[in-house]
Amino acid sequence: MSRPARVLLVVAGGIAAYKAPFVVRALKGAGLDVRVVTTPAAQAFVTELSLSSVSGYPVRSQLLDASAEGQIGHIELADWPDLVLVAPATADLIARAAHGRANDLASCVLLATRAPVLWAPAMNTNMWEHPATQQNLATLRTRGAAFVGPDAGELACGWVGKGRMIDPPIIVAAAQRILAQATNHPLAGKRVLVSAGPTRTYLDPVRFLSNASTGVMGFALAEAAARAGAEVTLVAGPVALATPHGVSRVDVETAAEMLTAMQTHLGQQTTDLATDLATDLVAMVAAVGDLEVANPSQAKHTKAELVEAMGRASWQRAPDVVATLASEHRPRTKFLAFAAQTVGPECEDVDAELIALGTAKMQRKGVDALFVNRVGVPGLGFASHTNAGHLLIARESMQVHPSGEPRPKPELATWMLDKLSAGLWGADA
């Protein structure tokens, strides 16, 4: 899509309407173009001024607006968006939409639009559980409506239960997935397995060897894939990062645990092409440790004996997770690996050296693609918010895509998935 995706936010008259400016800001922060329609009742909880200030557009609330209806304004509004988002969605507006009512601007737009509609319900828990509301929800689902939430917790009325509007970041993540599907993003509907973070090998119950990986790149890749409409599972080493919205997470510590978790996930998928339940892409972003202690001590070593104990330890190679999985699940599943490489200052052509190192590693691991980046310099690699490198994709011939100057890892993740989609599945670049 050459323009930003368009979202029409419909704000209904519930106490959760006060969150509507935060929803608008989150949508715009995700790069979406946002306009707002309110029901008359919503104006008791949120002002048009606040909504127009954050959206950058006048807010519409009146169906019979002489300044807009000369161009059949309610139909123009209904035709404008790529997605209609109703947040908060009250029991009343849900009921009117389910019965095809069109007695105000919001319900008229919902009846006239052909865009997908995402509802974020918010109401008293008794209203949510009432058979009439549940039947109305079922009716809307049969017509293709999607829902996000509600959450359970303390409600404004004092009740504790299900009915609280889900938080704005979760709403935005759901909206992005629907938009990705509606715009036929190559990853929409695909199954993606991502690993992230370091692994540990324990010397004793309190000491371990690890590496400098923070997991930021892997988490960014998982989040970007989920935004693109993929079904994403994230296998994470020990990192202090929040799970991206819309992503299923499995936590592990050691290389063996990571291999087992990923094999379990891949083993649960069938490779029957008729059912198309196989994992489409494995992104092995984790920095898996190379060594393990075969028999770590069950008791803590004293400081005095630690060095000697490390010398006595029985060291062995850790499992090569990506090579093992690629040998078992290619070619149905595509594999992306990562390579963090050092290049000395004496090297005359850093890019050529990185590409050569990355190509050799691709061949050793037997993967379809590899992102190689330099480490040991500011702004790149571990513990940095930015990164840059070369994405190598092996298809009929080797494709080399330089990422350019260091960029934030979430932005790099989106770029990388776009290039992978084009290179691995034949989409236009």
Image (cartoon, helix red, strand yellow):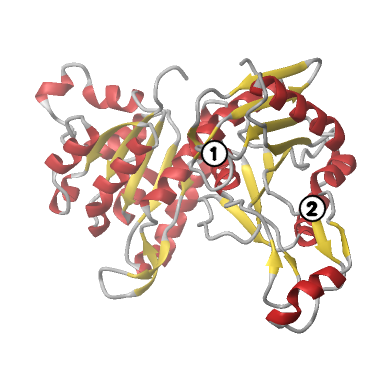
Q: Is residue 6 left or right of residue 21?
A: right
Amino acid on which disc 1 is placed = Ala
In which quarter of the view is residue 279 placed? top right
Which image quadrant: the C terminus? top right
Disc sitting over residue 290 in the figure:
2
Q: Residues within 10 Å of mark 2 (few under 14, many from 20)?
A: some
In which quarter of the view is residue 256 placed? bottom right
Amino acid on which disc 2 is placed = Asp
At 61% from the left edge and 38% from the top edge, which residue is drawn?
375
Image coordinates of residue 387 in percent, x first then y, are: 54, 35
Q: Nearer the viewer, mark 1 or mark 2?
A: 2
Task: Say which residue label 1 marks.
Answer: 224
Q: Specify which label sits upstream in the sequence, 1 or 2.
A: 1
At 79% from the left edge and 37% from the top edge, which residue is drawn?
333
In this view of the protein, which residue sits in the foreground, 394 or 67?
A: 394
Q: Residues within 10 Å of mark 1 (few under 14, many from 20)?
A: many
Disc 2, SS: loop
In which quarter of the view is residue 281 placed? top right
Q: Is residue 274 left or right of residue 129?
A: right
In this view of the protein, which residue sits in the foreground, 173 or 203?
A: 203
